[in-house]
Image (cartoon, helix red, strand yellow):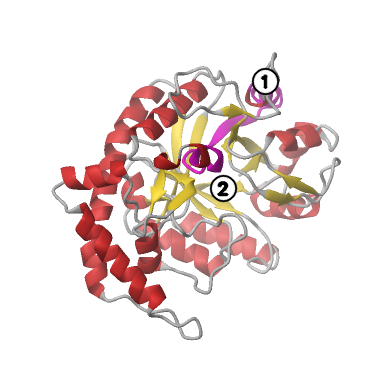
Amino acid sequence: MGFALYLHPFDCEALERAGGLQRLVDLGVRELVLAVAYHDGRWLMPWHPAGRVRFLEDGCVHYRPAAHYGRLQPQPSTAVPTAGPSPLERLGAAAERVGLRVRAWWVGNHNSRLGELHRDCAVENAAGDRYPYALCPAQPEVQQYLLAMAADLAGHAGLGAIEAEALGWMGYRHSSHHDKSSFAPRGLLDYALSACFCAACRQALAAAGHDPEALRQLAREALALGLEQACALEPAVVLPERFAAGLLPLRSVRKAVLAEFGARLAQVLRGGPALALQVHPDPWFTGSQLPQEQAALVPAVQHVVTAYGENPLAIQGLLDGVAKAPVPGRSLRLSLWPKAPQFAGEADLVQVRELARARGVGEFALYHLGLLPWRTLERVATVFGA
């Protein structure tokens, strides 16, 4: 069957001293998914020869930008030389020699570097707080940046697909810096905390016939009830149904914005690499995956369900949720991060493989080469690599 494997340019460098790409082929890897635009992070790397803890460069790209990006300018990482092939170009050539496909892993709107430089382009919640790690896709300048990046990626020969993450509105749910909170907002409360009221979103709401300030006030009321009037020693407050009904216009406008942007993105990628979208079944979801109701409006060939912190039962719930509203013409891929306590061994992996197959999943991907020990990779290969 084989599986795909996520990796970064620094993984490619380390791999040269650990058996090279052929070692991955022997394990059953059939496609490499290379980060081409990524955010900061602190990674614990079990086998990298240069060290164990790595701090990632923030908001960088691992290719050489050439398109017209406008005010939001991408910054090439230190892995991109001033002359010669970029990491994406090098991997494309090397992968072809051993029969591996290459996919670009494109993290779009999660960019703290650009969000800090251009805070007016970041998500603004109902209280007026900015989320600098989350660029707002309703902003025209953000859309220009994304479309230029798509054009640059599409120009790489041999690239089979682009997998888009964080193409929509990210909110409070996504971790940032050293997070501290007496609450763990979920569901509707998280959505109210994540609803964007930047200038572009207010304009889009007004153009659709909604009152942006009334919606902002409703979101503030939800925050007051769920946070200010709550108690950290008690179970989370369940917001009344009126908040769900009242905040529906935010979802409908986001769908309209994504539909228009998706049409423009399809034009940029016409005749080029296929587009895959990371998705989540919850329409109120505010993480880096697109809610499926939004993803359905963006032309793509595949939806990728990511399970980075879920056990087999929770993964079944994700797949069942996606299956409730299947999008015609979209294949399904499941991306897994196999680690304890969510997974206890091969039996759990086999369970996930079989339930995924039963729900129409045709491909599997593994997260992430640099984060997993070789022993884990070898055990996973016995289930997905044969």
Q: Amino acid at mark 1?
A: Ala
Tell whether 319 sits left or right of 223. Answer: right
Q: Residue 376 location, x and y as percent? A: 75, 55
| Extreme residue in the top direction | 83
Point out the frontmost of discs 1 and 2. 1
Q: Residue 118 location, x and y as percent? A: 46, 37
Q: Name the residue that disc number 1 marks.
A: 93
Q: Is residue 118 visible in this depiction of the protein?
A: yes
Q: Quadrant of residue 112?
A: top right
Q: Name the residue that disc number 2 marks.
A: 364
Mark 1 or 2 closer to N-term? 1
- Tell which of 24 and 154 is nearer to you: 154
- Tell which of 155 and 18 is nearer to you: 155
Marks 1 and 2: CB-CB under 8 Å? no
- Quadrant for the N terminus, please: top right
Q: Does the magenta segment cover residue 91?
A: yes
Q: Quadrant of residue 90?
A: top right
Q: Residue 251 location, x and y as percent? A: 27, 54
Cα gap from disc 1 to disc 2, whole angstroms: 23 Å
Crowding at mark 1 (Cα within 10 Å: few <14, some 14-19, many 20+): some
| Extreme residue in the left direction | 209
Tell whether 65 sits left or right of 123. Answer: right
Residue occupying image coordinates x 47% and y 30%: 72
Which region shows up in magenta?
89-115
Disc 1 on helix, strand or loop? helix
Residue occupying image coordinates x 84% and y 45%: 51
Q: Amino acid at mark 2?
A: Phe
Disc 2 on helix, strand or loop? strand
Residue 303 shows which numbered tag?
Answer: none
Tell whether 354 sits left or right of 222. Answer: right
Q: Residue 161 location, x and y as percent? A: 50, 31
